[in-house]
């Protein structure tokens, strides 16, 4: 029979997977080994135990989270239940949302280029440059 302390800790890679920061445990392990995840400000191994009260810093895809572990769950559940496993630092949340907003604005600005001209655009270009009028 397990005691209460052993049920209140879990491997870091399993917790990151259960909290839905990574789709698979293997991706979580690769991020930890790559130095993208820190536990209480220190670089750790995937097998390091996580307990409620620990602080986890996660860097993924240009975004970063600073979260405090609130609970441990060995199973991966829905996103709404997974969000109850941690609480994100307010400064971290604001910074991440600002970065997402900047990326979205930048992406919207790049969509205006359009690429190749349409058939209508090509005809207008030909009329403007004087090409194609020799047929008439």
Image (cartoon, grey):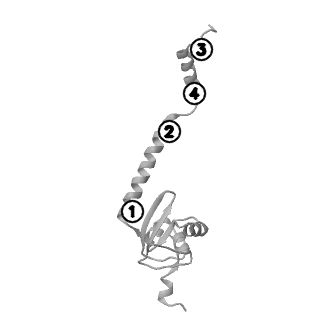
Q: Which badge, 2 or 3, is on the more N-terminal residue?
A: 2
Which quarter of the figure is the N terminus placed in?
bottom right
**Depicted 9 relative to depicted 22: above or below:** below
Q: Which badge, 1 or 4, is on the more N-terminal residue?
A: 1
Label 2, on which residue? 111
Q: Which badge, 1 or 3, is on the more N-terminal residue?
A: 1
Looking at the rendered structure, which numbered label has been put on residue 131? 3
In this rendered view, identify the residue nearer to me: 84 or 113.
113
Query: Where's residue 42, x and y in %?
Result: 47, 73
- Count neighbours of disc 2 (C-alpha within 10 A) and say few if under 14, some if 14 to 19, many if 20 or more: few
Query: Where's residue 9, x and y in %?
Result: 49, 81
Compute the Cα span from label 1 to label 4.
Answer: 44 Å
**Residue at position x 55%, y 24% in the image:** 121
Q: Are the residues flagged by discs 2 and 1 in contact, CB closer than 8 Å? A: no
Q: Are the residues flagged by discs 1 and 4 in contact, CB closer than 8 Å? A: no
Q: Residue furthest top?
A: 136
- Which of the 4 image quadrants contains residue 116? top right
Q: Which badge, 4 or 2, is on the more N-terminal residue?
A: 2
Label 4, on which residue? 118
Query: Where's residue 20, x and y in %?
Result: 52, 66
Compute the Cα span from label 1 to label 3.
Answer: 57 Å
Q: Residue furthest left?
A: 90
Looking at the rendered structure, which numbered label has been put on residue 92? 1
Of circles 2 and 3, which is in front?
3
- Count neighbours of disc 4 (C-alpha within 10 A) and say few if under 14, some if 14 to 19, many if 20 or more: few
Compute the Cα span from label 4 to label 2.
Answer: 15 Å
Of circles 3 and 4, which is in front?
3
Q: Which badge, 3 or 4, is on the more N-terminal residue?
A: 4
Q: Residue furthest bottom?
A: 1
């Amino acid at each position: 029979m397990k005691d209460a302390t052993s049920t209140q800790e879990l491997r870091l890679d399993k917790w990151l997977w259960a909290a839905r920061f990574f789709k698979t445990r293997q991706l979580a392990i690769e991020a930890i080994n790559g130095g993208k995840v820190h536990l209480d400000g220190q670089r750790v191994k995937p097998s390091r135990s996580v307990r409620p009260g620990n602080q986890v810093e996660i860097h993924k895809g240009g975004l970063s989270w600073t979260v405090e572990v609130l609970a441990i769950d060995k199973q991966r559940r829905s996103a709404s239940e997974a969000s109850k496993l941690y609480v994100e630092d307010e400064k971290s949340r604001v910074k991440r949302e600002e970065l997402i907003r900047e990326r979205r604005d930048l992406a919207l600005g790049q969509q205006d280029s359009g690429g190749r001209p349409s058939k209508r655009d090509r005809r207008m270009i030909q009329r403007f440059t004087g090409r194609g009028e020799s047929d008439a």
